[in-house]
Amino acid sequence: MKNLFSIEGKVALITGGSRGIGEMIAAGFLANGAKVYISSRKAEVCDATAKRLQEEYGGECISMPADLSNLEGINSLAGKISQEGNLDILVNNAGASWGEPIDEYSEQGWDKVMDTNVKGVFFLTQKLLPLLRKSGTSEDPSRVINIGSIDGIKTGLFDAFSYGPSKAALHHLTRVLAASLVKENIIVNAIAPGPFPTWMLSTGVGGGGDVDIDWSSIGDTNPRGRVGTPEDIAGLAIFLSSRAGAYTVGQTITCDGGVVASS
């Protein structure tokens, strides 16, 4: 019982790890003894975040930039991480959105969101299966955590018509992957976050540029009376990655302060 939530010594890859929820999870993993690789599309931002997180939390945080909306970028990242030879935890957090009025909504926006949020998750997981299979045992399975959204459960607030459907697809993909991989000592689950103080939410979920967000005002409308914190999302990810979560399979767990339950 003593080490139920330990991830000490585990190796994790967190996509979209240079900011927002991915950065929060990376910080929590580092603080609890994991070796962390982070990936994001912008190399300079990814490198800077890895350096800052390592200085703040210790351990090893390694930057591996990649564009995960296409197979070229996915294959590149899989090739780089394969040199590690070991992968215990994959957090599929890289995501995209696109906001436009419905009459103007573009194929470009639709495809960008679906390619990153659904296609990219499937094919990166596929390419990393050899490492996940190698690391997983019946006593300590490898873990895949897909970061969905409450917008995949309830109707979103913004004109981001492909975002919610892409996250609903990701939630179902989580169940499909979980059923396929559980017998190979790979456990797949999803987290559906609600409001967190992130860049994506501050831009109206990827729509029309920066929005000046009053986070306390958003928190006032939440059943818990606040927005999410790094401890909230990192704690849930640590649970799913540790011995405590080893019997939880194929679930989409909300982390939203009660938004879905109250709607």
Image: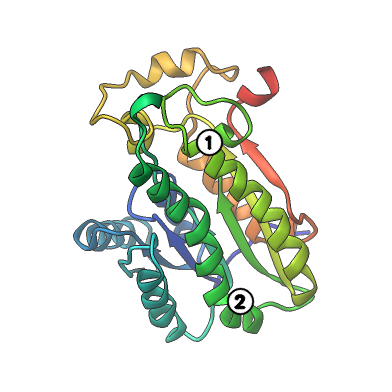
* Closer to the eye: label 1 or 2: 1
- How would you rate the neighbour count of disc 1 (Cα within 10 Å): few for under 14, some for 14-19, many for 20 or more? many
Quarter in which the C terminus is drawn: top right
Residue pictured at 57% horizontal, 54% vertical: 146
Tag 2 secondary structure: helix
In the rendered image, is residue 198 in sight? no
Mark 2 — residue? 132
85 or 103, which is in the foreground? 103
State the separation of the CA atoms marked 1 and 2.
29 Å
111 or 158, which is in the foreground? 111
> Looking at the picture, which amino acid does disc 2 mark?
Leu
**Label ID, residue 21:** none
**Label ID, residue 164:** 1
> How many callouts does the rendering have?
2
In the rendered image, is residue 21 in sight? yes
Q: Which residue occupies the extreme left position in the image?
A: 44
Asked which quadrant contains residue 137, the reply is bottom right
* 150 is higher (above) or lower (below) than 38: above
